Image (cartoon, helix red, strand yellow):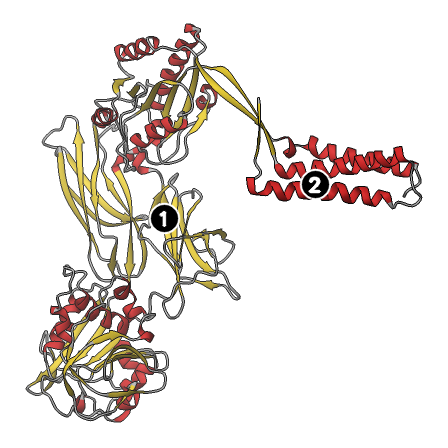
């Protein structure tokens, strides 16, 4: 035993000075007590109070008593049983479930250790490598049925090794049906002997099921949804065998195909949605006659059906390169549908089909037909009302993008007049177009704007190419410059009424698509082309980054599978909100209120983002409503998710012997089959040959006396004794 002090060295001098000062003060106080006690009583009172104070100060020094001893730590043989839904499957009518088979092997290991009488400890663990590993007993495990979704065999082995790292682990047995479908871990060999023991039928019975399912995560209303799938059949087939695959929503069959049965056949099912929202669909494959495992004959999928693409009208009195490249940018954006109107022999026509175009007659007609309008220069006679109804539509919510310099000539720009001129966020400030080399940079007001936020974050706008021509202008009240040159604003945003307006006052916007930055980029992340798309997107759809919004695209989860959620909170300027919390309310779809809120934790490396994992949800359709704290709270757009039965677990119809062998090779394990009597005997013989003697290991016992109730009791006893003596002497 030895004593240590947890008080820092520098604090000892102040502590000793405090102890001395306390003793002097107590002696001085009792020297002036009235009536004066006898010398013997005074010494007793001074001693009691001084001792109480010193005991308190000693607690500040925090003495620590450490005792060391050597103990015999028994050897450990651990058995880990995979805890996933597929282990509850029964491979035959006369065979126990895989879970029961695994527990039978575990029981034989326990009996072997008990018969050897070496004092070795049997430890039974259960887990799937995705959730926390739990210790259990054979009696408790026999009363339970595994229900977890997914498994990660390498992670399960790694977690078991970590769990028993401080124990003398002599052997590790992992019992699994071999399926490892959710994890990303690869695992490494360890020093402890490892056995991977497979349970379940390795060959499998005759079966037909889905083996590959592919579909887009999102489509638009009116756009065909194509579901690709493959069907694999195991077992004897005849020329007359056929298979039917169908796509349905609830009881409604959306598409159905029938064809000859083969070992592997591929199919396509098609459906065209007619309404936006989350579409939860099911793919069914007709079973074999008398087929035992039907879990892999169906699969559930969810597709986010968005409303029709935002319709953008591009009016081009002069069809220059700006118009061509904006149209190309729109083709690369699935959320947009752009139609170009150009001059025709008898008036404006649509560029794609040469059909005549006429301006809508009212602001409501403009808004009904289009979400945004792009003006490549003043439309002139194309708008018989001089743009009055178009300007009214913009104030009511229509988006408008104005390219002030559409022609490739230098000189006086064509004048803007009438209601559209009054709507523009700028007024001419210098007459003629200025030519030369004009460097462009992001304005201070543009750094928080959602149109440029992603590009600024990626560093794409750090060195824009110089522009060749700029129109000098002055800003109007309410205008927000986004890009500026050294002489004038270049890109200006405004929000007249409830609409959105962008003004671009430089020539050759299309040249940004050819700009080659210092760092190589692909067509998808090229900053110039992305800027062209962002101009159209913001004009048509507005700020979709602001407010509270759910992140992620997964919309279907299986019962027993954790549901992760992530939320992003941006203010009206697009800046992250970090000083308030976020919750997600979970309720059944169709319920107006009464949901359960769950608080999310902020992500330290991503300001304005919050994440968490919801508890396990039963099957059904659930609505997740993000909500930012405040007065009043700020709700976000709800999202519907679907929780289905654990189909992936029921689809694992046989032992995955191949994966067991591959995993065993990576982890340095011996791979055995519990269904083979010889393999089970090999396992027991190998365990019997282990050295299971106890391991002598040093142990330390640490005691901090001042942190116990006894120390506090000592202070109370000293002060109580002083109080009794004072009372008997009449000093109270």
Can residue 261 be spotted in the picture? Answer: no
Camera-nearest residue between 538 and 297: 538
* x and y percentages locating residue 399 in the rendered image: 28, 77
- Which image quadrant for residue 92? top left
Neighbourhood count class around disc 2 (C-alpha, 10 Å): few under 14, some 14–19, many 20 upward: some
**Disc marking residue 227:** none
Give the mark nearer the N terminus: 2 vs 1.
Answer: 2
- Is 52 left, or right, of 681 in this rendering? right
Write down the residue under mark 2. Answer: 19
Quarter of the image containing the N terminus?
Answer: top right
Q: Is residue 348 above or below residue 296?
A: below
Q: Nearer the viewer, mark 2 or mark 1?
A: 2
- Is 404 left, or right, of 445 in this rendering? left
Q: Is residue 257 above or below residue 511?
A: above
Write down the residue under mark 1. Answer: 642
- Which image quadrant for residue 499? bottom left
Camera-nearest residue between 501 and 254: 501
């Amino acid at each position: 035993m030895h004593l240590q002090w947890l008080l820092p060295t520098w604090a000892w001098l102040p502590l000793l000075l405090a102890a001395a000062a306390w003793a002097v003060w107590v002696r001085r106080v009792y020297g002036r007590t009235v009536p004066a006690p006898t010398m013997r009583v005074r010494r007793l009172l001074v001693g009691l109070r001084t001792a109480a104070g010193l005991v308190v100060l000693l607690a500040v020094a925090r003495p620590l008593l450490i005792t060391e001893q050597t103990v015999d730590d028994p050897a450990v043989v651990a058995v880990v049983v995979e805890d996933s839904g597929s282990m509850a499957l029964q491979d035959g009518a006369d065979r126990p479930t895989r879970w029961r088979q695994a527990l039978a092997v575990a029981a034989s290991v326990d009996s072997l250790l008990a018969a050897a009488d070496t004092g070795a400890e049997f430890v039974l663990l259960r887990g799937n490598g995705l959730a926390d590993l739990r210790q259990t007993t054979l009696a408790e495990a026999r009363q339970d049925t595994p229900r977890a979704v997914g498994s990660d065999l390498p992670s399960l082995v790694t977690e078991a090794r970590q769990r028993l790292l401080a124990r003398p682990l002599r052997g590790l047995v992992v019992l699994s049906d071999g399926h490892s479908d959710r994890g990303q871990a690869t695992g490494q060999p360890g020093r402890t002997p490892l056995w991977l023991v497979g349970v379940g039928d390795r060959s499998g019975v005759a079966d037909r099921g889905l083996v590959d399912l592919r579909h887009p995560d999102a489509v638009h209303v009116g756009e065909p949804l194509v579901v690709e799938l493959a069907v694999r059949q195991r077992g004897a087939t005849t020329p007359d065998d056929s298979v039917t695959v169908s796509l349905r929503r609830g009881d409604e069959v959306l598409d159905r195909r029938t064809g000859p049965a083969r070992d592997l056949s591929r199919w396509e099912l098609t459906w065209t949605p007619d309404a936006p929202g989350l579409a939860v669909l099911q793919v069914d494959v007709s079973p074999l006659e008398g087929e035992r495992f039907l879990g892999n004959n169906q699969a559930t999928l969810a597709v986010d059906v968005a409303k029709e693409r935002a319709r953008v009208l591009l009016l081009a009195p002069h069809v220059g390169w700006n118009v061509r490249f904006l149209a190309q940018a729109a083709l690369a954006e699935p959320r947009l549908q752009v139609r170009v109107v150009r001059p025709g022999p008898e008036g404006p026509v649509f560029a794609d089909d040469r059909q005549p175009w006429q301006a809508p007659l009212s602001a409501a007609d403009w808004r009904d037909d289009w979400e945004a309008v792009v003006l490549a220069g003043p439309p002139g006679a194309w708008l018989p009302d001089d743009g009055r109804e178009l300007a009214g539509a913009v104030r009511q919510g229509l988006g408008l993008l104005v390219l002030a310099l559409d022609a490739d000539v230098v000189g006086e720009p064509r004048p803007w007049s009438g209601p559209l001129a009054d709507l523009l966020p700028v007024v001419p400030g210098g007459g003629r177009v200025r030519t030369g080399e004009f460097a462009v940079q992001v304005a201070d007001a543009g750094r928080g704007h959602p149109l440029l936020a992603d590009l600024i974050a990626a560093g794409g706008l750090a060195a824009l190419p110089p522009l060749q021509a700029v129109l000098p202008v002055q800003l109007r009240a309410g205008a927000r410059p986004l890009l500026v040159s050294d002489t004038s604003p270049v890109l200006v945003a405004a929000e007249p009424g409830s609409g959105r307006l962008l003004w671009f006052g430089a020539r050759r916007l299309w040249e940004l698509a050819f700009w080659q930055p210092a760092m190589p980029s692909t067509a998808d992340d090229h900053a110039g082309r992305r800027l062209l798309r962002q101009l159209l997107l913001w004009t048509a759809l507005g700020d979709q980054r602001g407010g509270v919004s759910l992140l992620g695209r997964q919309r279907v989860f299986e019962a027993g599978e954790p549901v992760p959620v992530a939320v992003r909170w941006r203010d009206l300027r697009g800046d992250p909100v970090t000083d308030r919390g976020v919750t997600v309310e979970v309720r059944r779809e169709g319920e107006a209120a009464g949901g359960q809120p769950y608080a999310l934790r902020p992500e330290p490396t991503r300001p304005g983002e919050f994440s968490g994992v919801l508890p396990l949800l039963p099957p059904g359709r659930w609505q997740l409503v993000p909500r930012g704290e405040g007065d009043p709270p700020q709700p976000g757009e709800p999202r519907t998710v679907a929780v289905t039965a654990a189909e992936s677990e029921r689809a694992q119809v046989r032992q995955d012997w191949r994966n067991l062998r591959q995993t065993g090779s990576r982890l340095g394990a011996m791979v055995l089959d519990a269904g083979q009597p010889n393999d089970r005997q090999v396992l027991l013989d190998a365990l019997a040959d282990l050295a299971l003697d106890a391991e002598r290991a040093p142990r330390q016992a640490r005691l901090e006396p001042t942190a116990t109730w006894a120390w506090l009791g000592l202070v109370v006893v000293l002060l109580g004794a002083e109080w009794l003596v004072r009372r008997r002497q009449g000093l109270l």
